[in-house]
Amino acid sequence: MKTDFDALVIGAGFAGLYMLHRLRQLGFSARVLEAGGGIGGTWYWNRYPGARCDIESLEYSYQFSPELQQEWRWTERFATQSEILRYIEHVADRFDLRRDIQLDTRVTAARFDDRSGTWEVESERGTVTARFVIMATGCLSSTNVPRFPGLDSFAGGTYHTGRWPHEGVDFTGRRVAVIGTGSSAIQSIPLIAAQAAHLTVFQRTPAYSIPAHNGPIDPEFLREVKGDYAGFRTRNAALPFGANFPLNETLVSQATPEEREREYESRWQRGGLGFITAFGDLLLDRDANATAADFVRRKIREIVKDPAVAERLSPKQILGCKRLCVDSGYYATFNRPNVTLVDVSETPIEAITPRGVRVAGVVHEVDAIVFATGYDAMTGALAAIDLRGRGGRSLREKWAAGPRTYLGVGTAGFPNLFIITGPGSPSVLSNMVPAVEQHANWIGDCLAWLRAKGLDRIEATTAAEDAWVDHVNEVASLTLYPSCNSWYLGANVPGKPRVFMPYLGFPVYVMKCDEVAANGYEGFETTANGWAGRAPRRR
Ligand code: N01
């Protein structure tokens, strides 16, 4: 059956844009459907004060075009949201992507037609058909706003960090509540505190945060990277998180207390997420982890003047078990006279009232509430679409007890459906941009292979999927990751099954994907339907 496009890509963030480019290069016809009024995904929506990336700009960027890498000039070590969005807009223009992107088009459903082996994708704007559907819907795009009783009764303004008004919000002279203390809160709190009359932070779990020490990119480092960008990328891809976090393989027990202190201090001074690779066993051994956690708690006590507040800000869980945060002046913000920290770990938020936030019978009066309450991570955006595979099977139902994928890229029962950085792939435990490029390249190669072989249907087998899910769980169980209530486990969303979703180990994962491809897409079943044989379109 003839379809409107060879492939439909859902989402125009980093993943969708590059997928479109790759599909075009391979001669496939494609269209991107995007819910937002602009491109950029995360960087289109997350405009809260202080929003920036906590992976360094030189590596949180595409590598598919050496010219682009050389030309683009990042101004800061950690780029702001607006600079990243400018970069994405530039990429869209430079590679002429916009003509195949349809904005303001929220996909509501997609159905696989068994007979024709094609997909029908539905949005408010009608139905489009394609042989393949590629979900580039993002890992952290479906916002989580807890259902606090009385939420709708609040008289002031409410904002979620991930849906920030484009015109910005002026908090001058206002009393503001921030609920949550994850990465988004930690970035926005210092700026909101500097502007608002008063800021009340509602903290359920304190987070470990490492200073960013952000600033202009060191010109010498920039020269070095640009002198051998490909080498820089290759070296980073070989590291466990696929990012330039220098790996010290020494175990904590092999270092003296002085050596440990020196290592932690130098990582703290360097700033950023590389703190987590200070020793080889920080995410494997509780005692080892405790030494790093103690170091950060000491830093918090040094920065925060009121010992009681410092104690409340000090996390107790395993360091790195919830995603590590990176900040600019977060802990010091609690020294300001206009900032109050309310601990809601033992006494949860009871309700939102017309005038504020009620905890333990006390209403904290505010004029605005910022929900920095995170996302229905990894599965939320997929579950928001009524995806129906073979025989009308629903993805929501299939994943009711937790997501099941093969390599995070395919799922049994859903032929010709690909997921970019889906659950079961390194995704959020890696540098996202190289991770999406790796997936988009792999998917593009797979489609080209199918075409060359005269095949037009591909589906992960249940056996391969079962083995992969077991493997993902087994790897996670060897680490300390499952030990706390993180969004990696879905633990932040009430009722969500507790399953560790990302795959740990970017380099091993890439090898596995390459091996699967080299072995004729081992673990996938392929068939021919009739589309095959058409001459590839070249642009
Ligand atoms: O969300 P989060 P986020 N009552 O889930 C709290 C990426 N990111 O938007 O920990 C009270 O981390 C919740 O408490 P608890 C990054 O991967 C990247 O900050 O569940 N509190 C937590 O404190 C990050 O990890 C950048 O106990 C409630 C907070 O809300 C991910 O996005 C920047 C609550 C949510 O924290 C998500 O970060 C920003 C309730 N009922 C984000 N429900 C970069 O720099 C939830 N909370 C790249």
Image: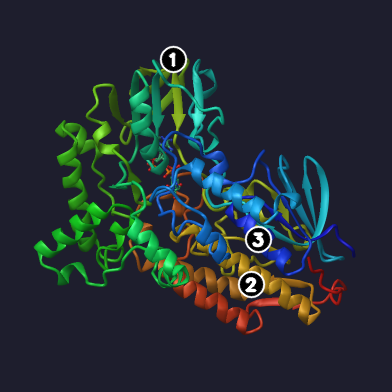
Q: Look at 51% across and 63% down and name the residue there.
A: 434
Image quadrant, ligand 1: top left
- Could you tell me how far apart the alpha carbons at marks 3 and 1 are, in whole angstroms? 47 Å
| Circle nearer the viewer, 3 or 1 | 3
Compared to residue 235, the image places residue 49 above or below, namely above
Whether the residue carrying mark 2 lies under 8 Å from ligand 1 is answered with no
Task: Single out the residue that lies furthest toward the bottom.
Answer: 519
Give the x, y percent position of residue 153: 52, 18
Colouring method of the image: rainbow
Q: Look at 37% across and 23% down and name the residue there.
A: 195
The answer to whether 219 appears left or right of 524 in the picture is left
Q: Which residue is mark 3?
A: 19
| Circle nearer the viewer, 1 or 2 | 1
Tag 3 secondary structure: helix
Label annotation for residue 355: 1
Compared to residue 145, the image places residue 137 above or below, namely below
Give the x, y percent position of residue 215: 34, 46
Q: Which residue is mark 2?
A: 462
| Pointer 3 with pointer 2, Cβ within 8 A | no
Give the x, y percent position of residue 240: 39, 68
Quarter-wise, where is residue 263 in the image?
Answer: bottom left
Kindly tell me whether residue 242 is visible in this rendering.
no
| Circle nearer the viewer, 3 or 2 | 3
Q: Amino acid at mark 1?
A: Arg
Q: Amino acid at mark 2?
A: Thr
Q: Earlier in the sequence, mark 1 or mark 2?
A: 1
Quarter-wise, where is residue 513 in the image?
Answer: bottom right
Label annotation for residue 432: none
Front residue (pair 317, 272): 272
Q: Quadrant of the C terminus?
A: bottom right
